[in-house]
Each structure stands twice: as C-alpha cells, then as structure tokens.
Image (cartoon, rainbow, N blue to C red):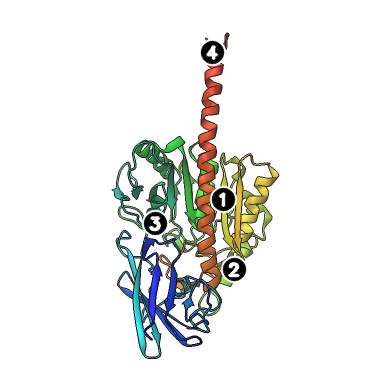
Amino acid sequence: MVPTLSIQPADALIDVPRQIRVEHVAPGQTVEITALTRRNGVLWQSQAAFVAGEDGVVDLTRDAPVSGDYSGLSPMGLVWSQSPVDSPSREHFNHPVTEALVTEVVARVAGAQSVARFTQRLAADGVTRQDVREEGLVGTLYLPPGAKPGSHPAVLILNGSGGGINEPRAALYASRGYAAFALAYFKAPGLSDYISNTPLEYFQTGLRWLRKKVQPKHDFVAISGQSRGGELVLLLGATFPTEVSAVVAYVPGAVVHSGQNACDPKIGREGPTWLLGGKPLPHVWENNRTATWAPFDEGPSPHRHEKAILTALQDPDAVARARIKVEDIQGPVMLLSATDDGSWPSSLYSKMVQDKLAEVKHPYPVKWLDYENGGHSILFPYVPTTQLVYAHPVSGKISTSGGNPRDNARADEESWEGVLKFLDAAVKARGQAAPSANRAEASAAATPGNAG
C-alpha cells in the first residue's frame, strides 16, 4: 500500500490554515511526517509521528502526534514547531517578503514515502509595493489589488525596539484589504541607528502623507504597532487624536519609557525616547525612586527585561508622570498582551489602559485579548514560534521574549483574527457615522439664523 499525502489549500495567504492528510495507510500504522521550509536561505524543520486511524488515515485537523516537535491537536503544528537547522536565525520570511514561502512535507510509512508542498504568501496576487522616501519619511507602502483613491481604509504600521520597516505585516494587511504603510523611525536607510530623541511630529507627517497619498475610504487611518511601537501608537492616538481613527497596540506599554535597549549609547538607556515640540516627554525611569536595571543585568543569560521594568512601576509618582493619556484617544482601541511577556509586563500595561478607558467611559469600543502563558512575540499565523531567546537587534543583549511555542502560536492565530474583526467593525462604524455627520452639517447650514 502506497501512502498518499495531500495538502489543501496548496497555495494561499500565510494566515490560511491547511489540511494535511495522509491516506492509504494500514490502521494503527505509524506515520512520520517532516516539514521543511527555506526562510531567507535558512532551512527550518519539524517532525512528528502519528498513528493512522481505523480508516487508514492521518489527518492533522483530527489527529494529535504521538511524538515529535509538538504535542496535542494542532492542524498547523508542523509549522509553528519548526526550528532552524544549524543556524541561530530568527528570520521567518524571505527577502523580499513578496517572495512566497514553500514548505515541503514528507510522509514516511514503513519504508514508503509521499511528498507534497504548500505555499504561504504574505502578498496576495495584485498587491503592489512602493518604497517611500518623501517628506523625510522612510517606509514602504503596500496597496490591495485594484486600489484606487478612496477604495480602501488605511493603516500605519510601526515596529518596536528592533527598528526597521515592518514589511511582512504591511503586506498581509494589504492582502486583507488595507492600504498599509510600514513606516520606519530608526535603523533604516537615512535614519538614526537608535530610538533616542525621536520626534512625534515625524509620525504626524506620516499620517498626513498617507491620507494625502491614498485618500482612504471613510478617511479611516488606523495605527498598528508592537512593543515600543505599541507604546508609540497609544501615545500617537493621545497626542494627535483627530488624525488617528483606531489604535491597535500589540504588547504595548502604558507609560512612556526611556531609550532602553535601543538607545544611542552616547545618550544612554535612561535618556529620552520621544520628543514633542523639541522637548523630551517625561518617562518612567526619570527621577524614579525604585527603578533598577539589576534584575535584567545580573545573572546568566538569557535575561528578562520585564524584571527591571517591574521595579520602575513600584514608584507611583513616576508612573503617574509618565502615563500615556489614553483618555485623549478619539477612536476604538485594541490591546493584545500575554501573561509571560519577557520584555515587559504587557498584560499589566494593557489592564492599566483598559481600566483608565473604563474609568472615563471611553465612548468607543475597547477590545483586549490577553494570552495566558504567551510571550512578547505576537505576530500572525502561521509562523514558527520556537525561537524565544535572541540577541537584541540594537544592544546585542541576550534576552528571552517569554512564553512557549504552543501558547505563542495560539496568540499568533487568535490575535490576527481578532484584529481583522476589530478593524472591520471600526471601518464600518466610521462609514455609518460619516453620513450622519454630513446630514447634521447640512441641517445646520439650512437652519435660518446660522449665517453670518
């Protein structure tokens, strides 16, 4: 009996789950399945063994492995449990990101084998990519297929303390119907190598450029950021509230932080990150009576940055001075966090934001997804989640992002579904509000006595 391996769909966007199925196997027989993917030139691999059911089938949507790189039922476990072979790489995507990922799956049964492949794409057919080097901005604009002025809502995407341009997320946002502008603010061509002394007006320029460029549907421009970018999108929503339609904050901070791991060494990690009107914004490490880096600096690697941040949060006066005024945001807010975040306490920070918005009776939707035992790296499905220890891209410090592969994979999958639903609802609400506002303006203009 020759086993038959099938994968459906064979070619789709990266966030689409696949059905991996092996047929024509004797009931009770062991089937070993290996998944191999080249990611930016580095081979990643996973393996698991299964026992065929009475129907002579192994179906990963139905069957859990009996051994291997993951346990429990998980249809895409062979993807998230992959690790790089003989490499410390944490690079999940090809360069350019428009180059699809191809995974070869090999099923072996009693000396016989069957091979199939599936393709994961970040950019759907028809998505366009444009480098942006205008008005001092450095970034990349991805547009959905057939995009025209006014045809799609927009989202501005900001990275965290690693800097650079978040093209993978922008490509996927565009594939899901958003004009997506991935904007760098350091560690990119023509910009500083460090996060220190970044002016918030730069992002206001980015928001205005995006509006002018794509003329978004319903004038809707959301901002989406992760880690330091999550702190940043809350700060931008509070600072430029009329220019931000919705905020998506991945593993955010609820207070303004110092330069930390991404600082300019000449300024130091306790120096300022953000400037407004040329002046540094107060940050939580400033004049803090309890803050110490010792829990992060001392002891063996990998280091857990969260431990140092928790010492700073013990000074309520410093926290109050540095707290982001999220009550000034004029739109829906989505928070995504995890309880085992090794970089900083994103669950605690998200609760601080949610509690403040509840206290002031924020007149827009607030959605919070908090992932038990998950870590700092919440991305999107379906990517490897095994590489928890890393050298920080700027400081080089060996750290852990926390969590574990299974719970991080769950966070990747559920968070992306949640974000798309949140944004879709926000766009619809914006569209429904616009005609009402226009009717109110027309009525006011037609009322006698309003002239002059």
Q: Amino acid at mark 2?
A: Asp
Mark 1 vs mark 3: in front: 1
Left or right of 166? Residue 222 is right
Residue 351, quarter of picture: bottom right
Query: In the image, residue 17 lies at what x, y percent?
Result: 45, 64
Mark 3 in CB contact with mark 4 (< 8 angstroms) = no
Question: Which of disc 1 and disc 2 is earlier in sequence?
Answer: 1
Q: CA distance from mark 3 to mark 2?
A: 24 Å
Q: Which residue is mark 2?
A: 340
Residue closest to the eye, 243 or 382: 382
Q: Which residue is mark 1?
A: 334
Mark 2 vs mark 1: in front: 1
Question: Which of disc 3 and disc 1 is earlier in sequence?
Answer: 3
Residue found at x 51% / y 68%: 409
Q: Is residue 409 above or below residue 433?
A: below
How busy is the neighbourhood of tag 2: few (under 14 within 10 Å), some, or many (20 plus)? Answer: many
How busy is the neighbourhood of tag 1: few (under 14 within 10 Å), some, or many (20 plus)? Answer: many
Q: Which residue is mark 3?
A: 166
Residue found at x 57% / y 53%: 335
